[in-house]
Image (cartoon, rainbow, N blue to C red):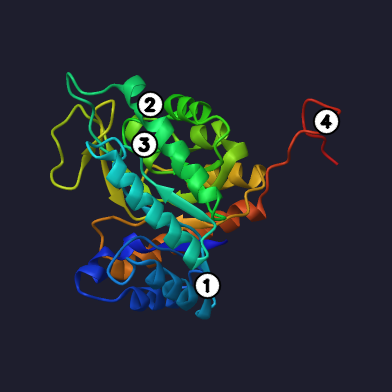
Amino acid sequence: MKISAFLCSYGPLFEQGVSVCEVIDRAAAQGFGAIEPFPCAGLETVDEARRVGAYIRDKGLAVSCYSTGCELLGPDSAAVLAQMRHRIDQAAAMGSPYFHHTIHPPLVLPRRGEADFAQSLVRAVPLVRELCFYAADRGVLCVYEDQGMCFNGCGAFRRLAEALGDAPFGVVADVGNICFVDETAEQFIGHFSSRIVHVHLKDYLRKPGNGPCPGAGWYVTRAGDYLRDTIAGHGVVNFPAVFRLLAQIGYDGWYSLEYAAMEPISFGIGMSVDNLRRYYEDVRRNPVQLPLLDSISPRFE
């Protein structure tokens, strides 16, 4: 299993002042084969990105993707575009094949008078297209995932993908974010199988919305249920089905663990990796037999 460490998973270490290179050392010691960096102290300039990329390779690891959050639909989109162009330059300098940024990340429903999906789409498409072509000129592919409430779910994401037209981009299958719009990772993978180039792995506990809010740390889905980040394998994401579908489409890229659970990273990240590897290996030992072209059902021989 090609498993990558998304450095945002190590937030508690960064809060303690641990350097980005020390966090990379920690990820390498935990058995990760690649790093997905994000902007942090020591990774703000293009030169710093080049040095961090070299450090990752010196550790025998790959750079799977370079990711960052942003709000493209805010009041100063020109300033955000300039910042994203800088991040793309960083991605190219560190040797990342992909650059991932959010578009409109709020995890709350729009209020009365705020822009709806159609209005947000009209604003977002020319900005995203500009970044896609800027990145392509530098040998980097922009990639987008199901995220937030706006550009999430199979229907909304398909409209975004179609609106981008001939812009060069790929799809990140985030197996957890889809839960916020009450759909499943399997549905998203099935809809966008031909464009998936990267995968984010995370998991959520889910409680029905007909009871009181469980408290701090819980989000509300589009349909009113409650979600909380948890150790991969402890929640509702059907990882065996996810891995079977990705195997079926021949996915051979990186699986990047994005860990944001309440359970401490001291054991939560390692436990997540152990669970994910176990599910993945079980799928590899028990592959699905695909139908043959000359019959409707698989032939048993």
Do tag 4 and tag 1 residues touch (Cβ < 8 Å)? no
Give me the C-alpha separation between circle 3 and circle 1.
31 Å
Q: Give the SS element for disc 4.
A: loop
The dot on residue 293 is: 4
**Is tag 4's residue or tag 3's residue first in the polypeptide sequence?**
3
Q: Which numbered mark, 3 or 1, is in the foreground of this view?
A: 1
**How far across and down, in percent of the image, does residue 296 sit?**
78, 25
**Is tag 3's residue or tag 1's residue first in the polypeptide sequence?**
1
5 up-or-down from 191: above or below: below
The residue where tag 3 is placed is: 179
User: Which class describes the residues within 10 Å of circle 4: few (<14), some (14-19), or many (20+)?
Assistant: few
**Is tag 2's residue or tag 3's residue first in the polypeptide sequence?**
2
Q: Give the SS element for disc 1.
A: loop
**Is tag 4's residue or tag 1's residue first in the polypeptide sequence?**
1
The residue where tag 2 is placed is: 121
Give me the C-alpha separation between circle 2 and circle 3.
21 Å
Q: Give the SS element for disc 2.
A: helix
Identified by mark 4, the residue type is Leu
Do tag 2 and tag 1 residues touch (Cβ < 8 Å)? no
Identified by mark 2, the residue type is Leu
